[in-house]
Image (cartoon, rainbow, N blue to C red):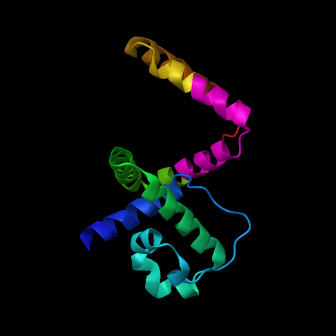
Amino acid sequence: MNNIKHNVLMLVGLLCMGAVFSNSVMAQEFNSLSTDVQTTLSSFKGSWDTMDADKQSRLINGAQRWNSLNPEQKQTAQERFKRFSNLPKAQQRDAAAKMQRYKNLSPKKKNQLKNKFERFKNMKPAQRQQLQQRFNKQQRMAPSRMPNRRP
């Protein structure tokens, strides 16, 4: 039972972190879901019929994604969710907004961003710190000129 609650919490975290959402959704009967999805979403069974189709779809997609993860990926997701849930609400909202902006990027832009992040991760710690300091200085000097940033 405790494992089911834990899985549900992780599922909610995955949804917050950008699980795939469907645009065209229809309500589904809980009993029509696959057995593994029903197990993952068992804590929602009592309220399933009162949920709108979009929320059902998000939960189903999140459950399917969760069920497809291997144990190591689940562990990583659990750790990320724990860190996310310990953030202040304002930072959670900011992280969710950033994730949404990332999801709205073109595949080309996403790939460019991933490549830049890989280069950043491969830098020596001193280089990363220097780059971070330069970025912070730019932020302080002209925050309104940064794309997708609120002043």
User: Does residue 113 show up magenta in the picture?
Assistant: yes
- Residue situated in front as seen by the camera: 50 or 91: 50
Instruction: Report which quarter residue 129 is drawn in.
Output: top left
Query: Is residue 140 visible to the viewer in this orientation of the structure?
Result: no
Residue 82 is situated, as x and y percent measured from the top left of the image, at: 35, 53
Q: Residue 115 in the image: x percent, y percent? A: 59, 24
Asked if residue 95 lies in the magenta stretch, the reply is yes
Q: Is residue 137 above or below residue 70?
A: above
- Image quarter hosting the N terminus: bottom left
Q: Quadrant of the C terminus?
A: top right
Magenta residues (range): 94-115
Q: Position of residue 30 (x, y in %)?
A: 52, 82
Q: Position of residue 11 (x, y in %)?
A: 44, 62
**Left-right relation of 90 to 101:** left
Which residue: 70% across, 32% down? 109
Q: Residue at x 45, y 83 (%)?
A: 45
Q: Which residue is located at x 58 percent, y 81 percent?
A: 51
Residue 131 sits above or below residue 44 on the image: above
User: Hey, which residue is sitting farthest left in the picture?
Assistant: 2
Q: Nearer the viewer, residue 72 or 103?
A: 72
Task: Classify 143 as above or below 33.
Answer: above
Which of 124 and 89 lies nearest the eye of the viewer? 124
Quarter assignment of residue 56: bottom right
Say whether residue 34 is visible: yes
| Residue 28 left/right relative to 35 | right
Looking at the image, how many numbered discs can be counted on the residues?
Answer: 0
Q: Is residue 26 above or below residue 79?
A: below
